[in-house]
Amino acid sequence: MSVSAIYAGSFDPITNGHLDIIHRALNVFDVVHVSVIDNLEKQPLFTIEERIDLISNSIHSDRVIVEGFQGLLVDYAREKQIFNLIRGLRAVSDFEYEFQMSLTNRAQDSRIDTVFLMTDQSYSYLSSSIVRQLAKLKGNISEYVSEYVKTKLEEKFHG
Ligand code: COA
């Protein structure tokens, strides 16, 4: 029996920290759905189509499915019939928010479990907004994103 999990996020853009979590998740689950949220409260830099394209071109595995979703994560999980959620933990400071999200999701549907994976220490300070800011100001982002994402960020900010 194949066991699947959902790794949901805004991925604006996907970073090497996210990719590290996906690779770790593939060691635990047979199939990982990388699910990009389409109803962000924050105004994204990249459209949903662009964010999906950035992920698809940064990870090449037939065990990874990249797609968008709208609305509540639990509704999407029910639709997929996948009740394992993956979240990455970068530092202790992530824990409180993640704990709250995990329990809220479970309160919505008791079948939901969240599996937390620790990101590699070298990415513990990384976030998509830091990458966006660095790219905008022409900082060096080579260590933080794939070559493809780096090129697309440069195009977005500097034509
Ligand atoms: N490496 C690098 N960055 C990481 C990271 C890692 N391993 N893990 C998290 N981050 C960063 C992200 O890049 C992002 O950075 P930014 O704020 O600078 O853009 C930040 O941490 C937030 O992480 P993200 O993965 O985008 O998740 P989120 O906290 O925005 O949550 C959902 C996204 C989709 C999981 C959540 O909002 C959700 O479930 N929404 C659906 C609505 C719903 O069901 N609500 C009830 C949920 S309780």
Image (spheres, rainbow, N blue to C red):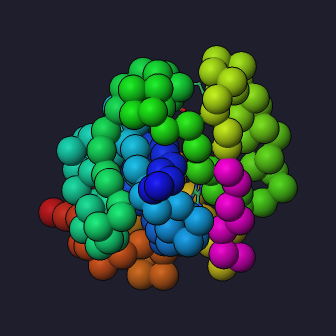
71 is within the stretch colored magenta? no
Q: Mark yes or no: residue 143 visible.
A: yes
**Residue beneath the point at 40% across and 50% down:** 33
| Highlighted magenta segment, given as a residue range | 115-121
Identified at 25% across, 41% down, the residue is 47
Q: Is residue 54 above or below residue 110?
A: below
Whether residue 61 sits left or right of residue 106 in the image: it is left
Residue projecting furthest to the left: 159
Ligand 1 quadrant assignment = top right
Q: Position of residue 79 (x, y in %)?
A: 39, 26
Identify which residue, 106 or 13, lies in the foreground: 106
Tell me which residue sits at (53%, 26%) in the image. Answer: 74
Residue positioned 62% across, 50% down in the render: 87
- The correct choice, above or below, for 80 with respect to 36 in the image is above
Residue 124 placement (x, y as % from top left): 69, 68
Query: Does residue 60 lie above or below 111 as drawn?
Result: below
Q: Position of residue 21 (x, y in %)?
A: 56, 65
Quick one: quadrant of the C terminus? bottom left
**Which of the 4 image quadrants contains residue 92?**
bottom right
Out of 6 and 120, give the one closest to the viewer: 6
In the image: residue 101, left or right of residue 79: right
Quadrant hosting residue 48: top left
Residue found at the far front of this picture: 1
Q: Quadrant of residue 100?
A: top right
- Picture coordinates of residue 139 (x, y %)? 44, 74
Can see residue 101?
no
Q: Is residue 98 left or right of residue 16?
A: right
**What number of labels is visible?**
0
